[in-house]
Image: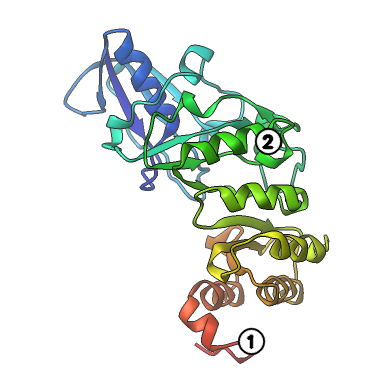
């Protein structure tokens, strides 16, 4: 069969589902390629991760006998078959040679209002793979897990990452409420440039959790500890600044994430520019003094 693939988002980040579909079909002897308008296909897969706010859908009808749409951008009730889900991704699809992408766990017990993970993957963090399922010696590992530390197998999985000696990035971040001294010791042994956390809910005081980790974690440089701060979602400017100032004073590097950014007010966009431009952030200590 001739298989065509469409990465609807095209946000310069590889689509894991398409890489797995490519590997599956190639293993079955099928021809797999990026969709070409000039060709007819037996099956076209179009994958979309983001909703219409951030990623517009394609405006054409693919030339194919069967078109299969998948990804959270099309809904939460679609998933890859197990035979495809647990296959080594075809990294050659994106020309990737030095980085592995995948999930060790799925699900999250937090069920935050702005997040779809709980509805899509469940309210428990469970192990779904060993590292060897998607990593075969690459220099870097891009981990996509929503809440690895909430999984009962977290120590085993952290050990797998440590033993890989690969450079690890957990792009969804760790749960600071679960990052105790033992976790800090594990992360200190991992080849990880930055540990990412989040303080999304302004009505939860996480100060002592951040203080405890900062004390236990052996890498003290600010740039090694990043905290995502969600703004424009059920928070006042006072609550935004409290979180930003608190984590900064505890030795973390805050990074502002704007909910519904296209419709965010000017003051919120100004706040994001102030925090995320580190040259400005280090020179101008208070947002109240920041002028543009």
Mark 2 secondary-structure assignment? helix
Residue under the point 70% across and 47% down: 183
The answer to whether residue 257 is seen in the rendering is no
Q: Residues within 10 Å of mark 2 (few under 14, many from 20)?
A: some
Read off the residue under disc 2.
154
* Mark closest to the chain's N terminus, 2 or 1: 2
Mark 1 secondary-structure assignment? loop
Q: Is residue 180 above or below residue 251?
A: above
Outermost residue, left direction? 38
Judging depth in this view, the residue of 156 and 232 nearest the camera is 156
Left or right: where 212 falls relative to 251: right
Q: Is residue 202 above or below residue 118?
A: below
Residue under the point 65% across and 27% down: 127
Q: Nearer the viewer, mark 2 or mark 1?
A: 2
The N terminus sits in image quarter: top left
Q: Quadrant of residue 244?
A: bottom right
Image x and y of residue 11, in percent: 39, 47
Q: Quadrant of residue 121?
A: top right
What numbered label is drawn on residue 122?
A: none
Read off the residue under disc 1.
286
Image x and y of residue 280, in percent: 49, 83
Residue under the point 59% across and 63% down: 219
Image x and y of residue 147, in percent: 67, 41
Q: Is residue 39 above or below residue 190?
A: above
Judging depth in this view, the residue of 189 and 209 nearest the camera is 189
Image x and y of residue 106, in percent: 63, 31
Judging depth in this view, the residue of 57 and 157 nearest the camera is 157
Q: Alpha carbon of mark 2 to alpha carbon of mark 1: how far?
A: 38 Å
């Amino acid at each position: 069969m001739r298989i065509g693939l469409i990465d609807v988002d095209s946000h310069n980040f590889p689509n894991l589902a398409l890489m797995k579909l490519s590997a599956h079909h190639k293993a079955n002897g099928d021809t797999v390629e990026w969709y070409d308008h000039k060709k007819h296909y037996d099956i076209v897969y179009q994958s979309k991760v983001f909703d219409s706010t951030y990623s517009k859908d394609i405006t054409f009808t693919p030339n194919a006998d069967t078109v299969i749409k998948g990804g959270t951008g099309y809904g939460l009730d679609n998933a890859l078959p197990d035979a495809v889900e647990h296959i080594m991704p075809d990294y050659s699809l994106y020309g990737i040679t030095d980085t592995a992408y995948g999930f060790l766990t799925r699900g999250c017990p937090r069920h935050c209002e702005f997040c779809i993970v709980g509805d899509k993957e469940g309210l428990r963090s469970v192990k779904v793979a060993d590292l060897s399922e998607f990593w075969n010696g690459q220099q870097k590992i891009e981990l996509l897990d929503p809440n690895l530390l909430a999984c009962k197998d977290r120590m085993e999985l952290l050990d797998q990452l440590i033993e890989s000696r690969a450079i690890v990035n957990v792009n969804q971040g760790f749960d600071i409420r679960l990052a105790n001294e033992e976790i800090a010791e594990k992360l200190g042994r991992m080849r990880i440039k930055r540990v990412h956390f989040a303080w999304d809910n302004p009505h939860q005081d996480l100060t002592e959790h951040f203080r405890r980790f900062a004390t236990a974690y052996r890498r003290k440089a600010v740039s090694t500890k990043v905290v995502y701060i969600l703004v424009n979602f059920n928070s006042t400017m006072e609550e935004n600044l409290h979180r930003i100032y608190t984590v900064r004073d505890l030795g973390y590097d805050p990074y502002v994430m704007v909910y519904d950014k296209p419709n965010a007010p000017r003051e919120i966009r100004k706040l994001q520019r102030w925090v995320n431009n580190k040259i400005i952030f280090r020179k101008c200590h208070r947002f109240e003094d920041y002028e543009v």
